[in-house]
């Protein structure tokens, strides 16, 4: 019983390292993929003219699978974007493998980042006339004597 208790308690260094490594590797992958997109190395017709931004890369704890969250600016169909990225995945994985030194290059899966659409929706709400009117009203608790 004593042996099981000792095994269950990770050392502080190993626990910290295990928690941060997927994040650090995700950042390396994000930068490597960003360089590929920035240089315009992709020749897929479905991605022509797309200005792709990588907002986040999340890895599984074993670093074998990476989910890449992307957003695209302008009028671009998200389904066409994901299909083009899916076709370009072998090329992207090879480019990342040359840039980032890992024992195994993770499998790449792409998803559209919903935060961009959400922020656009919030901006639309804030620009509505009724909301702008409410935002322009000063709160009643403000007193001129404090200025």
Image (cartoon, rainbow, N blue to C red):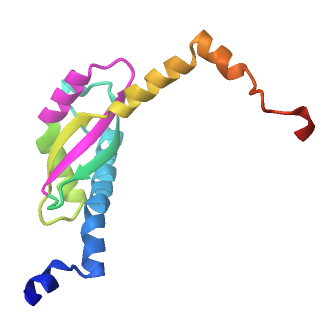
Q: For residue 66: magenta?
A: yes
Residue 147 visible within the image: no
- Measured as percent of width and height from the top left, residue 16 is found at 30, 72
Residue 17 visible within the image: yes
From the viewer's perspective, is residue 20 above or below residue 26?
below
From the viewer's perspective, is residue 86 above or below residue 2?
above
Q: For residue 85: magenta?
A: yes
Q: Nearer the viewer, residue 108 or 124?
A: 124
User: Going by the image, does 88 lie left or right of 26?
Assistant: left
Q: Quick one: which residue is furthest to the top in this view?
A: 129
Report the magenta residues as a range.
Answer: 64-87
- Measured as percent of width and height from the top left, residue 120 is found at 45, 24
- Measured as percent of width and height from the top left, residue 73 is found at 39, 26
From the viewer's perspective, is residue 116 above or below residue 2?
above
How many labels, in total? Answer: 0
- Picture residue at 27% right of the left edge, 25% below the top: 48
- Measured as percent of width and height from the top left, residue 60 is found at 18, 55
Question: Which quadrant of the view contains residue 118?
Answer: top left
- Picture residue at 33% right of the left edge, 31% below the top: 114
Q: Quadrant of the C terminus?
A: top right
Q: Quadrant of the N terminus?
A: bottom left
From the viewer's perspective, is residue 21 above or below residue 127?
below
Q: Quick one: which residue is furthest to the bottom in this view?
A: 2
Question: Which quadrant of the view contains residue 21?
Answer: bottom left
């Amino acid at each position: 019983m004593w042996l099981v208790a000792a095994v269950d308690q990770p050392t502080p260094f190993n626990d910290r390292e295990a928690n941060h490594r997927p994040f650090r590797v995700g950042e390396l992958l994000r930068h490597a993929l960003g360089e590929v997109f920035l240089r315009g190395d992709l020749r897929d017709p479905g991605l022509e003219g797309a200005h792709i931004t990588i907002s986040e890369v999340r890895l599984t704890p074993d670093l074998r699978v990476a989910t890449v969250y992307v957003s695209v600016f302008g009028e671009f169909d998200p389904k066409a974007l994901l299909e083009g990225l899916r076709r370009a995945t072998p090329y992207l994985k090879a480019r990342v493998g040359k840039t980032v030194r890992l024992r195994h290059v993770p499998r790449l899966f792409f998803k559209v980042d919903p935060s961009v659409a959400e922020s656009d929706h919030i901006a639309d709400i804030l620009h509505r006339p009724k909301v702008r009117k409410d935002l322009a009203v000063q709160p009643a608790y403000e007193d001129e004597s404090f200025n």
